[in-house]
């Protein structure tokens, strides 16, 4: 605003000087924030100039993030509690829900090159409303970081004699150097380590099935601690624990947003990569859960005191390795598998969690503190959970969290599939820029608060024990119904504050991909592609999305239409 002041007195001159200093400070802060976010396009659209990876590299990098061993522990836990039959049906329900909800958001991420938070803003939540879902996702990342860190600490204690408390610290601290450098470093890490991880994981299972075929029959007949048969309540309790992983799609999307433009030449590869690395991650997740239960049942049936460690992945693999090779080599490979798995997933957990916290903080305070700050915050919370022995309460923690994760992802997926394409009340092109969106859209916010809140009450028995196992069903159904209902009641008027961003250039190219046209932000003086900028309200110039986010007084925001 300082360029609009016309000095005529000493007071006016002083005001001008003060305003100039304030403007310089804002520009300096914006410049510092810009330099960091351009490493991996934190909080913003990922431009095609940065997206140089092939569809295959992006897919492998995304799938590398699901190398976690938590699936083995989850499968073992639900099977031990409810038996193989209920666990298999529960895993099937989990896989179906993930496929249906994951496809719309994965497509939007790959097509429009934005992460799930940016998609959420324009899919029913508004600019500030999606802060709620960012906190839900950040919670997912530190819960699963703690879970994987606990598994690694178990491996270090077993293989090297390192006390658990120290193992927790090691598993936390070793991730920091790897996660600082963003997508470029993560892509290399995932591609290089995936072949070894696959051999170490698949080999023992294949060996056991071939060498001891009777183990398959034992597995299928296992009835668990409940001792009962297959029933719907137990199936849903199993599915509820598995569905705590529903927010994993957000981590897949942190990679999928770097997909290259979709063209007639690469259309087939593009779709295969999106489907496999997006909702398709659940195929591998479900297989790992089944294998985890299979190995647990084998330990219970064949190893003395096997039941005490049957849900710990490091023991599952160690016992099978011992049948295949000398003790020293078995122990070495078991530890290597645990360490590789933990690193592959926890660099993603730390990276994605830092994005979620940073995004929320920047919007609320209009300051960009740097992503590294929230890497450390996320890791500190995870370390506290590990030291508090969260592994012992795994089913309860994951079952509780599943309600929040489902409320969020189902709401966003429903807004895309129904409100955008069927009811046409939500704009098809996702909007994420401040000034273009209302602060809060009741469509998504009400849906998540009500569906998540009610399902949590159900989970803790607030509506009686008879409905308690069905809290996942409650979360899904409420989100599925409330999202279109709220859109109809509000007539879709809270999605867009403006429909025109003031720039007379097309947003998309001839193939429907975001335009690669480059424009310069007058605040941070950096070049950005067309979808990441808007016209400034007070200057005949362009301003980027991050500078809009850090605009403390709203100087740059265009008025509502």
Image: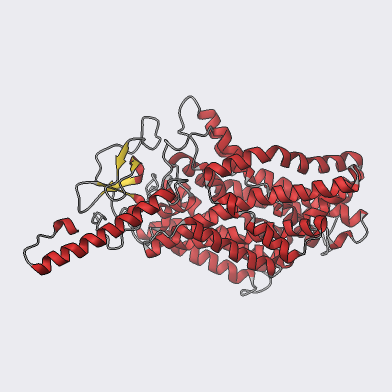
Q: Quadrant of the C terminus?
A: bottom left
In the rendered image, residue 7, in percent from the top left (x then y), is placed at 9, 62
Drawn side of residue 489 relative to residue 475, left or right:
left
In the rendered image, residue 142, in percent from the top left (x then y), is placed at 60, 61
For the point 78% across and 61% down, the residue is: 162
Look at the image and tell me whether residue 198 can be seen: yes
Drawn side of residue 107 relative to residue 121, left or right:
right
Q: Quadrant of the N terminus?
A: bottom left
Q: Nearer the viewer, residue 137 or 555?
A: 555
For the point 30% across and 37% down, the residue is: 506
In the rendered image, residue 66, in percent from the top left (x then y), is placed at 65, 47
Picture quadrant where residue 462 is located: bottom right
For the point 77% across and 59% down, the residue is: 154
Picture quadrant where residue 239 is located: bottom right
Instruction: Determine whether 276 is above or below 448 in the image.
Output: above
Disc count in the image? 0
Farthest residue in the top direction? 265
Instruction: Determine whether 345 is above or below 482 in the image.
Output: above
Look at the image and tell me whether residue 475 can be seen: no
Instruction: Determine whether 215 is above or below 13 in the image.
Output: above
Q: How is the image coloured?
A: secondary structure
In the rendered image, residue 178, in percent from the top left (x then y), is placed at 59, 49
Drawn side of residue 379 relative to residue 302, left or right:
left
């Amino acid at each position: 605003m300082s360029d609009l002041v016309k000095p005529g007195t000493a007071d006016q001159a002083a005001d001008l000087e003060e305003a100039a200093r304030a403007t310089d400070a804002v520009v300096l802060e914006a410049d510092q924030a810009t330099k960091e976010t351009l490493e991996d396009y934190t909080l913003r659209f990922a431009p095609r100039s940065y997206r140089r990876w092939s569809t295959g590299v992006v897919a492998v990098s995304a799938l590398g993030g699901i190398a976690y061993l938590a699936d083995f522990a989850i499968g073992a836990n639900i099977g031990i509690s409810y038996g193989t039959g209920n666990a298999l049906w529960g895993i099937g329900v989990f896989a179906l829900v993930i496929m249906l909800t994951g496809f719309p958001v994965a497509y939007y991420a790959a097509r429009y090159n934005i992460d799930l938070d940016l998609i959420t803003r324009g899919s029913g939540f508004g600019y500030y409303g999606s802060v709620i879902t960012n906190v839900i996702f950040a919670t997912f990342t530190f819960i699963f970081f703690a879970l994987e860190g606990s598994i690694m600490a178990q491996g270090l204690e077993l293989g090297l004699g390192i006390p658990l408390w120290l193992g927790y610290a090691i598993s936390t601290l070793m991730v920091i150097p790897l996660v600082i450098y963003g997508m470029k470093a993560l892509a290399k890490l995932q591609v290089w380590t995936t072949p070894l991880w696959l051999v170490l994981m698949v080999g023992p299972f294949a060996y056991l099935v071939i060498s001891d075929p009777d183990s398959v029959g034992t597995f299928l007949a296992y009835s668990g601690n409940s001792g009962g048969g297959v029933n719907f309540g137990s199936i849903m309790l199993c599915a509820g624990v598995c569905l705590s992983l529903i927010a994993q799609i957000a981590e897949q999307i942190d990679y999928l947003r770097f997909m290259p433009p979709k063209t007639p030449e690469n259309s087939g590869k593009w779709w295969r990569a999106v489907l496999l690395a997006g909702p398709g991650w659940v195929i591998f997740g479900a297989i790992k859960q089944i294998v985890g239960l299979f190995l647990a049942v084998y330990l219970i049936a064949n190893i003395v005191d096997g039941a005490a460690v049957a849900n710990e992945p490091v023991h599952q693999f160690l016992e099978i390795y011992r049948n295949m090779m000398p003790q020293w080599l078995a122990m070495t490979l078991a530890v290597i598998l645990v360490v590789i798995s933990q690193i592959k997933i926890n660099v993603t957990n730390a990276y994605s969690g830092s994005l979620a916290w940073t995004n929320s903080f920047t919007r609320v305070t209009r300051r960009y503190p740097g992503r590294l700050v929230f890497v450390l915050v996320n890791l500190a919370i995870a370390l506290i959970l590990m030291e508090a022995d969260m592994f012992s309460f795994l089913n309860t923690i994951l079952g509780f969290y599943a309600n929040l994760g489902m409320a969020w992802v189902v709401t966003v997926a429903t807004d895309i599939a129904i409100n955008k394409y069927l009811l046409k009340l939500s704009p098809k092109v996702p909007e994420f820029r401040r000034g273009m969106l209302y602060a809060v859209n009741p469509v998504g916010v009400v849906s998540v608060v009500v569906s998540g809140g009610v399902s949590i009450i159900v989970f803790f028995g607030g509506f009686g024990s008879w409905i308690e196992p069905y809290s996942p069903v409650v979360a899904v159904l409420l989100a599925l119904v409330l999202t279109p209902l709220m859109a109809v009641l509000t007539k879709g008027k809270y999605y867009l504050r403006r429909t025109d961003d003031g720039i007379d250039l097309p947003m998309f190219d001839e193939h429907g991909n975001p335009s690669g046209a480059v424009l310069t932000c007058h605040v941070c003086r950096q070049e950005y592609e067309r979808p990441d900028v808007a016209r400034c309200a007070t200057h005949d110039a362009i301003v980027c999305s991050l500078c809009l986010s850090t605009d403390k007084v709203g100087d740059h925001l265009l008025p509502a239409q």
